[in-house]
Image: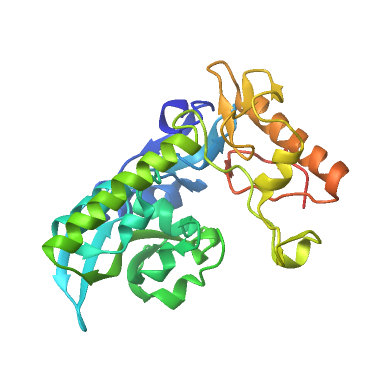
Amino acid sequence: MRERCWFRTGGAAEYFCAPDHEDALSEALAFARSQRLAVTVLGEGANVLINDAGITGLVIRPSMAQCRVETGRNGTVLLTAGAGAALSDVIECALQHHALGLEEFSGVPGTVGGSVYINAHYFDVLLSQFLVKARVINCADGEIKDVPAEWFAFGYDVSRLHDHQHILIDATFALRAGSTEDAAYARGRRDEIIRHRMRRYPASHTCGSFFQNFNPHEVTLHVEGRPMTAVAYYLDRLGIKGTLAVGGAVVSTKHANMIVNRGTATSADIAALARRMQELLRDAFGLVPRPECQLLGFSECPLLKA
């Protein structure tokens, strides 16, 4: 599985498939039920840490990547994309049809399925602000149903998909219809966002932000009258960027909340480094951050409990 995640670590899957249409996905789930296999769903692997021992059961990597566009109401465009579509491809499809909004996520790695699962965000913009409906399949009985946005019970880094009872087939987003000039401006904005991200964040061998930001009620420090919830702020104050390391894993020189595999790291190295970051924050500030990174294949969580 190391070739299917950004960290480039982790062991093998017991079973693996990449269904490219919903019938194949249904067949895969039926096989898992018949063999009584646990099911793990994987997107582009941009936000996961996979156990060095691998993943038991069936790993499904949805590869439905279609993208279609239709006219909505009140100056909107409805874009429906398969769970396996890369978010970057969906943004390009939207811009080709002068549909605006998703360019805010330019440079964010991942698939539609993974992005909906985690309710992808960039600064204050959430993917749930655009999603209006979707189709999901029930892992227990194979039922496919249409669901509204409210069904997902979206929150910060969370959605109903975290119950692991359903898998996304496709999602529909309501976007703003724009002119040719609007689309050209959005393309320029996309390029600038990507340039900004490349300057601020490591671009490979990482899962991005490893820990979630704190909730406002969890912190006592205020800056300019607002609660300081950014976990990177506290990690920065520890002076660990580019220096704190375990084995082949090191805290990024660019961002204190990002861990990078220097090429020789194991998942155990990364988990141990993340735990050490938690311990340092706890000792210095009395705060224990929760992982944003999804841990796959671990029978026990190797991190501190928040």
Choose between 11 and 158: the one closer to the eye: 158
Specify whether residue 30 is in view.
Answer: no
Q: Quadrant of residue 191?
A: top left
Left or right side of 64 for 250: right
Q: Position of residue 306 (x, y in %)?
A: 77, 53
Q: Where is residue 7 in the image (x, y as percent from the top left)?
A: 51, 30
Choose between 193 and 250: the one closer to the eye: 193
Residue shown at the point (64%, 37%) measured from the top left: 256
Residue shown at the point (37%, 59%) measured from the top left: 168
Residue that extends furthest to the front in the rendered view of this protein: 224
Q: Position of residue 223 (x, y in %)?
A: 72, 59
Q: In which quarter of the image is residue 18?
A: top left
Specify whether residue 48 is in view.
Answer: yes
Residue shown at the point (53%, 26%) measured from the top left: 9
In the rendered image, the vertical position of residue 67 relative to residue 63, given as above or below:
below
Q: In which quarter of the image is residue 116?
A: bottom left
In the rendered image, the vertical position of residue 263 relative to residue 291, given as above or below:
above
